[in-house]
Image (cartoon, rainbow, N blue to C red):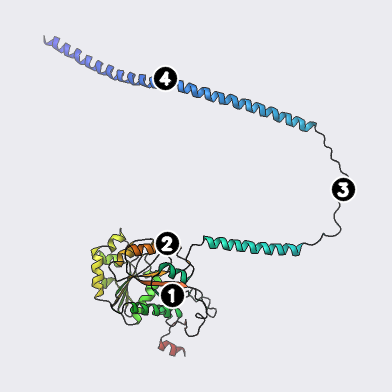
Amino acid sequence: MGEIKQSLIKDYVSAEVAQSGLTQKYKTLSGARESYRARLSRLPQLEQEQRTLQRRLDVAQNTYATLLKRLQEVQLAERQAIGTARLIEAASPPLKPSGSTKVLTLALGGILGLLLGSATASFLEMRDRSIKTVKEARDLFGYTWLGTIPYFGKQPKRRQPNWTVPALPVRDMPRSLVSAAYRMIQANLRFLSLDRTLKTLVITSSVPKEGKSTVAANLAATMAQLGRRTLLIDADLHNPSQHHIWGISNVEGLSDVVVGGITAAKAAQPVLDNLSVLCAGSMPPNPLALLDSKRMSLLIDSLEDQYDCILLDAPPLVVEAEALTLGRITQGILLVTRPGVVDLESARTAKELLDQSNQPVLGMVINSAILEGDALRSNYYSDEPRVPVAEAMAVR
C-alpha cells in the first residue's frame, strides 16, 4: 500500500509540474496571439499609408519626367538658335577724363552723412528710456531733494597721467566740490530732523550702478568728520562692496553678528576717526529672512545706544526687497538716483514700491550729475588731496 501511495504522489507532483509549465506556455502563447491581433488590426491602416505613398511616388516620377522632357527641349532650342549680333566698331579708350564730379560727390556725401547722423541720433533718443537730467529725476520721484553730487569721473589735464579720482573724495579730497556736496547733503538731513535725532538711515537706489554704496561711504565719512560716532553697515548681502571701497576684510560681518557667531563690537572695523564699518560678512542662504528677523531688529536697537548715526547700505529696490524690510526698523530711507543709468520704468517701479509700503522716505540724492556753468572750474574748491602739516613742512 505504501508503494502505491508513493507512486501516486510522484505522479501527482509530475502532473503539477507539467501543469505549471503548460500554464506558463499558455500565457506566453496568449500574449503572442494578442500581439499578432494588434498588428493584424493595423494592417488596413498600413495598407492605406502604402497606397498614399505609392501615389505620391507616381506623381513625383511623372513630374520629374515632364521637367526632364522640358529641359531637353530647351537645351535643343538653344543649340538651334543662331545669334544676330555683330561687331560694327571696336571701342577705344578716351583721350581725356570726363567732367569731374568730386565736389558734387563730397557735397552729397556730407549731406547724406548729416541726415544719417540726425536720424541715428533721433532713433537712439527714442530708444533711450533713461532719466537724463536732474529736473527729470526730481519731477518723477517728487521726494525732498537733499543735494546733487557732481560727476567727477574725468581727471583734470594738469594732473599726472596716472592720477585717478579716489572712491572716497570726502576722505582723500576734503576741499573738492564733491566733498562740499556731501557736506551739504549731511546738513540738509539735519535740517529735516530738527524736531528729532536722526540716528538710523537706509541708503538705497532703484537699480544697480547708481552709486548708492559710494554715497553711503562718503556720507558716513562726512558725519564722522563732524565728530559724530558713525557706523556704516553693508546690508547688501547679495553684492557687498563696502569692504572694497575701504580696503578691509569681509570675512566676518553683519550676517555673522545676526546669527550670533560674533559680536558687533568685534566685527565692526574702524576706518576713520569716529567711523567704523560693519561689512556684510558670509553669504547667508536667505538674506531677506536674516534681515527681517527679530535678531536684526534687536541688533539695530542695541547699536543705537553705541553710535550717534547708523547708515545701512541696502540693495536696490527693484532688484531685492531688503531695503523695504530695513526701512521698517530704521527712521527713514535715502534714495540715490543717477541720471543716465536708471530708466523711467525702473524709477516708477521703485517709487511705487516705496509709496505702497508707506516707507518714510527722507529725501533723494542725485548722483554723478553733469553740472553746467563755471562751478567745476571755480578756484574756490580744490581737488588737491589733503596733506598732513608735518609732511607739508617736510616738502617745503
Q: Which one is in front in this view, the residue at disc 3 or the one at disc 1?
A: 1
Q: Which residue is drawn at 82% across and 34% down?
A: 82
> How far is disc 3 from disc 4 in space, using C-alphas?
81 Å
Q: Which one is in front in this view, the residue at disc 3 or the one at disc 2?
A: 2
Residue furthest toward the right? 89
Say whether marks 3 and 4 touch (CB < 8 Å). no
Q: Which one is in front in this view, the residue at disc 4 or the one at disc 1?
A: 1
Give the secondary structure at mark 1. Answer: strand
Quadrant containing the N terminus in the rendered view: top left
Residue beneath label 2, please? 346
Residue beneath label 3, please? 90
Q: Which residue is drawn at 39% across and 63% down?
A: 350
Q: Residue 29: horizontal and vertical position, in percent?
A: 33, 18
> How far is disc 1 from disc 2 in space, using C-alphas?
20 Å
The answer to which image quadrant residue 157 occupies is bottom right
Residue beneath label 1, please? 148
Tell me, for residue 173, which label it has, or none.
none
Q: Is residue 295 above or below residue 391?
A: above
Residue beneath label 4, please? 40
Between disc 1 and disc 2, whose residue precedes? 1
**Which residue is at the front of the view, 11 or 252?**
252
Between disc 3 and disc 1, whose residue precedes? 3
